[in-house]
Image (spheres, helix red, strand yellow):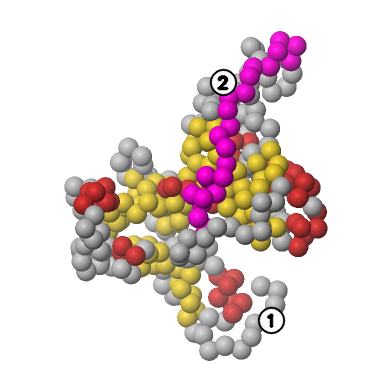
């Protein structure tokens, strides 16, 4: 927002989250809202007079009910994140059904009419709601759930990329590890791909626990898009080969930092990230433009 604001007649904007600086910069009133095709309109909103804290998407709108559940189906406590379920009047404030798709309807609704949105939402101590990620974009790194959006935010804060997408790469011991596809900005391009990749990984190490650090960096000119112009992460995941289990180091390597007795690292890496079983540290990999 370092450019001069052009003349405009806009008076009101809807945003994906409360961003006070944006409204102040452009001189417009803003509200945050959340919705999807299935909710017909916005099921979670703020108010221009009561915007809430920065980053919130609001509170539940009239005609809707919400629940935030953990993986076992229990309602989460204030301050925690979980799966967002929403309920409304079917055919009025909530879609009635998927057309001629019985299987999709049965999996989308529970026996009490709650619709599984597929979104991960956090609720704070005051009841404000925050979008965390799409369930399908959550990575399973060992025993930890990791939000791809958290890693993407950190990478964009490095000032080296115009856009990026973090996806899961299959790993024989950890189930999944994070990998990033990114479009460099001018500063990133000036570094060259090797140095750019190294700096992205180094920045992640400085700002994330080790189990959230990307294990590979893939510099691309563009990201694949769906018909709604969203990044097609399924295509990116398909580009990544599975990482096979690495052999145990020889006894001559035992005792070096990062190795436990028997030649494998302990199940907990630096940063506190639990791992699944015993494994050797995955050295971050670099790749060239595709």
Relative side of 131 to 161, left or right: left
Name the residue carrying label 1. Answer: 4
Front one among 186 and 51: 186
Side (left or right) of 229 relative to 222: left
Q: Please provide percent x and percent y for residue 126.
A: 41, 56
Residue 51 tag number: none
Question: Disc 2 and disc 1: Cα gap in Å?
Answer: 55 Å
Q: Position of residue 16 (x, y in %)?
A: 47, 65
Label 1 Cα crowd, 10 Å radius (few <14 / some 14-19 / many 20+): few
- Residue 217 lies, in percent from the top left, at 67, 45
**Disc 2 residue crowd, few under 14, some 14–19, many 20+, Cα 10 Å:** some
Residue 288 seen from this side? yes
Dominant SS type (magenta): loop
Question: Which of 234/92 is in front?
Answer: 234
Q: Is residue 177 visible?
A: no
Residues tagged 2 and 1 counted as in contact (Cβ below 8 A): no
| Residue occupying the point 73% across, 22% down | 257
Which corner quadrant holds the N terminus?
Answer: bottom right
**Does 177 appear above or below 19?**
above
Residue located beneath label 2 in the image: 278
**Element type at mark 1:** loop
Which marked residue is nearer to the observer: mark 2 or mark 1? 2
Q: Secondary structure at mark 2?
A: loop
Q: Is residue 147 magenta?
A: no
First of labels 2, 1 by sequence position = 1
Magenta region? 230-253
Q: In x, y percent, where is residue 155? A: 65, 52
The residue lying at 41 percent from left, 72 percent from top is: 47
Image height of 52 relative to 212, above or below: below
Q: Quadrant of residue 271?
A: top right
* 264 sits to left or right of 195: left
Q: Tally the numbered discs.
A: 2
């Amino acid at each position: 927002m370092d450019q001069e604001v052009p003349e405009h007649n806009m008076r009101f904007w809807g945003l994906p989250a409360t961003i006070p600086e944006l409204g102040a910069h452009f001189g417009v009133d803003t509200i945050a809202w959340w919705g999807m095709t299935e909710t017909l309109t916005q099921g979670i909103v703020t108010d221009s007079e009561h915007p809430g804290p920065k980053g919130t998407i609001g509170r539940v709108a009239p005609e809707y009910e919400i629940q935030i559940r953990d993986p076992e189906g229990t309602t989460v406590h204030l301050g925690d994140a979980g799966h967002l379920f929403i309920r409304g009047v079917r055919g009025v404030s909530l879609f009635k059904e998927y057309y001629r798709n019985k299987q999709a309807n049965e999996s989308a609704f529970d026996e009490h009419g709650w619709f599984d949105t597929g979104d991960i939402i956090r609720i704070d101590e005051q009841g404000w709601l925050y979008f965390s990620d799409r369930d399908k974009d959550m990575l399973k790194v060992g025993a930890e759930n990791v939000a791809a959006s958290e890693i993407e935010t950190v990478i964009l804060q490095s000032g080296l990329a115009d856009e990026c997408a973090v996806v899961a790469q299959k790993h024989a011991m950890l189930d999944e590890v994070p990998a990033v596809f990114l479009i460099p900005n001018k500063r990133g391009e000036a570094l060259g791909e090797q140095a750019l990749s190294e700096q992205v990984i180094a920045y992640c190490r400085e700002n994330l626990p080790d189990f959230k650090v990307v294990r590979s960096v893939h510099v691309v000119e563009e990201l694949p898009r769906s018909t709604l112009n969203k990044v097609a992460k399924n295509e990116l995941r398909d580009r990544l080969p599975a990482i096979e289990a690495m052999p145990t180091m020889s006894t001559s390597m035992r005792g070096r930092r990062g190795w436990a007795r028997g030649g494998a690292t302990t199940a907990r890496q630096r940063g506190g990230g639990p791992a699944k079983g015993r494994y050797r540290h995955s050295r971050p990999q670099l790749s060239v433009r595709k």
